[in-house]
Amino acid sequence: MFVSIANAQTASGGGGFDPLQLLPLVLIFVVFYFLLIRPQQKKAKAHREMVAQVKRGDKVLTGGGIYGKVVKVVDEHSVQIEISDGVKVHVARPTITTVVDKGDTSYNEKDQTKQNEKK
């Protein structure tokens, strides 16, 4: 008798699909999109635009931590930078992380000392 009651209780079950069950998953996706995916896409787009606008004479910082001055734009995939007097290397454009501003003293100290020596 107890077996038939137990079977009857498990068989009667749910009653269908409830759309509110998907609401937490949708909310989690929306939060991930606005907090993780969208800002990362904006950052990647800004980096692509910055790398595409690199031109001769720009002072850059590579992903390996090397400061240099762009001597030649080889093609859309690589540039040639001068890292020291007479030392030129080819680097892939995506490895350029930053175009160094004029006011950045970490790279311009050497240039400023050369200018002071000329005066």
Image: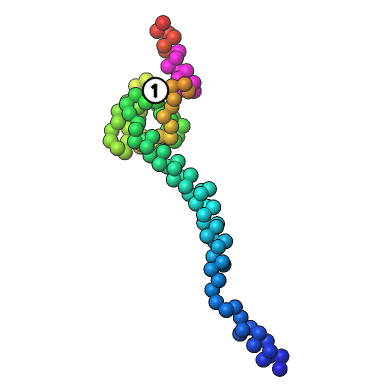
Q: Let me know if residue 112 is in the magenta part.
A: yes
Whether residue 39 is visible, yes or no, is yes
**23 left or right, relative to 63:** right
Label 1: how many Cα within 10 Å (few below 14, some 14–19, many 20+): few
The residue furthest top is 119
- Residue at x 66%, y 85% (from the top left corner): 9
Q: Position of residue 19 (x, y in %)?
A: 53, 68
Q: Let me know if residue 93 is in the magenta part.
A: no
Q: Position of residue 108 (x, y in %)?
A: 45, 20
**10 left or right, relative to 100:** right
Quarter of the image where one finds residue 93: top left
Q: Name which residue type carries label 1.
A: Ser
Does dot 1 land on a helix, a strand or a loop? strand
- Labels in figure, total: 1
Main secondary structure of the magenta stretch? helix
The residue furthest right is 2
